[in-house]
Image: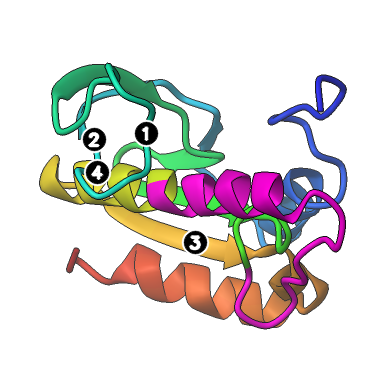
Amino acid sequence: MASIRGRGNKTTETAFVAILRAAAIVGWRRHLKLPLRLFQDRNAQRPMGSRQGRRHAATVRPDFVFRELKLAVFVDGCFWHKCPIHYKAPKTNEYYWERKINANVARDRRIDAALKSAGWRVLHLWEHELATPSGVLRKLRRRLACRCR
């Protein structure tokens, strides 16, 4: 687990950078810090004594940020973020992995809610979507053009 890094993933973020550069899309930054107020999920399974339901300041680092357009883009791995198409639960240590992956999904929801309440738009791209750059570009251009949340 310690050798798995959250940034610089060759198969997802680097592939998305290549798509952006090939399409000459500019105005983005990687891992830009966005200070936000996050809310803990009251229904999450937490050990006793933890900070359930409390507000706390946190720094969110979306994979890609279009600052002027207030668009945060996350490139999610199919395993780590529980892709509805490709996720397959491990057979060993099932309890650990179920809690770990569900915590990732819950954290993603909290971050999305915090970003949206701060006026940001959020786009999630799945790892498997990067195989078809035209589909990724269509989705991205739609979000860049849309002024809705």
> Do the residues under discs 1 and 2 have CB atoms within 8 angstroms?
yes
- Kind of residue at disc 4: Asp
Q: Which mark is residue 124?
A: 3
User: In which quadrant of the rendered image does the N terminus lie?
Assistant: top right
* Front-most of residues 19 and 41: 41
- Kind of residue at disc 2: Gln
Other-residue count near label 3 (Cα within 10 Å), few / some / many at <14 / 14–19 / ≥20? some
* Front-most of residues 90 and 107: 90
> Label 4, on which residue?
41
Report how far apart the C-alphas of labels 1 and 2 lie in the structure.
10 Å
Kind of element beneath mark 4 = loop
Mark closer to the observer (1, 2): 1
- Kind of residue at disc 1: Arg
Kind of element beneath mark 1 = loop
What residue is drawn where x is 14% and y is 40%?
Answer: 118
Report how far apart the C-alphas of labels 1 and 3 lie in the structure.
26 Å
What residue is drawn where x is 50% and y is 76%?
Answer: 139
Report how far apart the C-alphas of labels 4 and 1 lie in the structure.
10 Å
> Label 1, on which residue?
46
What residue is drawn where x is 19% and y is 51%?
Answer: 116
> Is 16 rendered above or below residue 118?
below
